[in-house]
Amino acid sequence: MYRVGIDVGGTNTDAVVLEGKTVLAGVKASTTEDVTSGVIEALEKVIEASGIDRARIAAVMIGTTHFTNAVIERRHMDQVAAIRLGLPSGAGLPPMVDWPDDIRDVVGNHGYQVRGGYEFDGREISPLDEDELVRIAGEIRAKGLKAAAVTCVFSGINDVMELRTKEILQQHCPGLPVVMSKDIGRHGLLARESAAIMNASLLSLADRTVAAFGKALETAGIKAPFYITQNDGTLMAADVVRAFPVLTFASGPTNSMRGAAFLTGIKDAVVVDVGGTTSDVGSLAHGFPRQASTTVDIGGVRTNFRMPDVFSIGLGGGSLVVEGEKGISIGPKSVGYRVRQDALCFGGSILTATDIAVASGKADVGDKRLVAGLDKALVQAAAAKIDAMLEACVERGRISSTPVPVIAVGGGSILMPEKIGDLDVIRPDNFAVANAVGAAIAQISGETDRVFSLIDGRTRESALAEAEAEAREKAIAAGAVAETLEVIEREDTPLAYLPGNATRIHVKVVGEMGGYDG
C-alpha cells in the first residue's frame, strides 16, 4: 500500500508517493486559484511518475495554506458572535480589542460580555447569566451570524460555564456552530479568545475546503481516506479540520521540517527551508518541530495555540540582487515562481540569488554560460552576503551551543553553502519536495494540557499517568494504532498561586495511522 503526500503552497503544489520509507516519485505543479485543479494535476503527475496502481493508495495527506491565507488576505471569513464570560472583571478590554481594524470589521465586531467566569483558584467570579445568553441568542438569529465563539475566564481550570453556554446557544439557535476556547488555546485570556473567534470565522471555509479536497480525490479516482496536517506535524481527520481549521496555520513549514527529519534520519537539527521568496528556519527536537512558548501573531492577531517556533527571512531562489550606493542588497523582493522565466541563468533579464549560486559554482541549474559575464567582485560579494544571511538565521534558530547539523530543503536550498560556521549542511535526496514528504509521513497525535490538583491522595506520578492515558485515548480515537504510540512531550509546571497543590501537565503522544504499516 502507498501513501500520497501533497503540500499546497502559494506557488507550487508538491506531491510525493511513499512505499514504506522509500520515496517513489516527487513532482511539482502550479498552485491554482481554485486549488482543486492544482491538486488534481499534482496527483495525476505523481501517479504517472511513480507508475503505481491508484487503487492501492492507503491514504492521502494534505498540507494547506488555505486558512492562513484567508486571515492574511481578510477573505472568506464569516461574522462571529464573540461571547466572553467574566463580568464584572475584564469589562475595560472587550473582545477583539487588540485586533487590527480591518480584520475586526471582517468578522463583524459582535462582542458580548456576560456575567460568569472563574478566579485563578477556581472560585466563581459571578454566576453565569443565562437570561443574557438567551437574549444574545436572539440577536444572533436576528443578525444572521454564522457562528459563535465562547471564552470563559480561566476555563482551563473549570470548563462548566463554556459547556453550559454552548448548550443554551444551540438550544435557541439550532445548528449554530459554537467554538469553545478551552478546545483551542491555552492560558492567557485575550490570546485564547482571539484563537477561538478566528477559528469560528473560518468554519464555513473549512467545510468548503474539505469538500473540495474530497472532490479532487474522487475526480482522480482515489477512494482512500484523506487527512490534513496540523501545526505540530501530525494529522487531523477531515471532520476534525471542519471543526478546528486554525490548527493547520503553520502546517507548511512544519511539513518541511518533518520531511527533513525523515529524509536524513536526523532527529535533532536546524532546518532551513528555502523557497522562491523566503527561507523558513526552525529547530527539530526528537524529530518534531520545537513549539513556540509565546503568543504567535497571525495576520496581526495574537493567538496562543500550538505553533512551531519558526521564523522567516526574505531570502529565496528568486530574491532580487541589487547593487546600490550602500553595497549589495538581496531580497526581500523576489520574482517568486517566475524564477525560471526571469532569472539570467534561464534566459531572463533579472539578477537573482539563483544566478549568484550558479555563477559562484554552488549550483548547476539553467545555463551557466548566461551568467559567465557577471562581474566577479559582484558575484563574490553577493555570495558572501547570502552566506552571512543564512548563517545569521541558523544561529538564531539554534537552541543550544551544542553543534547540530543544518538540513537544507526546498527548491531554493541550492543557495546553502557546504558549512555554516562550524555546522555541517546536509541536503538530502528529494530535498525540493520535503514538504510533501513531511505530509506523507505524518502521524496521529493525542494531547492533554490541563491543571491537576494534587490532593486527596493524588500524587504527581498518578496525575502524569492520568494525563498520558487521556492523551493516548485521544490519539486512538483519532485513528492511531495503540501499539505504536509513544510520548514525545511531557511537561509538569507547579502553579504556586493556586490552592490545592495544583500543577499544569502537558502530555503529547504520537503513533502510526491505522491500516498503514510503513
Image (tube, rainbow, N blue to C red):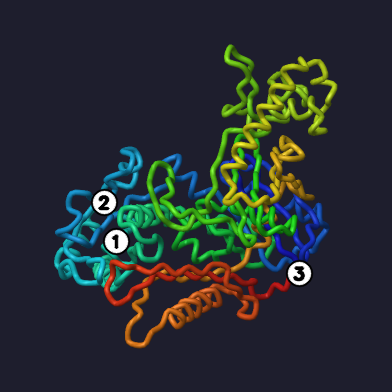
Q: Which residue does the numbered mark 2 point to in the structure image?
A: 95
Foreground residue among 189 and 71 = 189
Residue at x 46%, y 53% (from the top left corner): 205
Residue 501, position as x, y percentages in the image? 32, 75
Circle 3 residue: 1
Q: Is residue 241 visible?
A: yes
Label 1, secondary structure: give it: strand
* C-alpha distance separating marks 3 and 1: 44 Å
Q: Amino acid at mark 3?
A: Met
Q: Which mark is residue 151?
A: 1
- Residue furthest toward the top? 325
Taking the image as shown, residue 157 lies to the left or right of residue 204, namely left
What amino acid is found at the position of numbered circle 1 in the picture?
Answer: Thr
Q: Secondary structure at mark 3?
A: loop
Question: What residue sits 56% from the left and 53% below the top?
Answer: 251
Residue 359 x %, y %: 79, 25
The furthest residue to the right: 369
Q: CA distance from mark 2 to mark 3?
A: 49 Å
Counting residues from the N terminus, which is met first, the one under dot 2 or under dot 3?
Answer: 3
Report, in whole angstroms, how far the alpha carbon at label 1 lies from the one at label 2: 9 Å
Residue 16 horizontal/vertical position (percent): 73, 54
Q: Nearer the viewer, residue 217 or 474?
A: 474
Marked residue nearer the N-terminal end (3 or 1): 3
Left-right relation of 493 to 90? right
Q: Quadrant of the N terminus?
A: bottom right
Considering only vertical position in the picture, is 7 above or below 343? below
Residue 40 visible from this viewpoint? no
* Amino acid type indicated by mark 2: Pro
Earlier-in-chain disc, 1 versus 2:
2
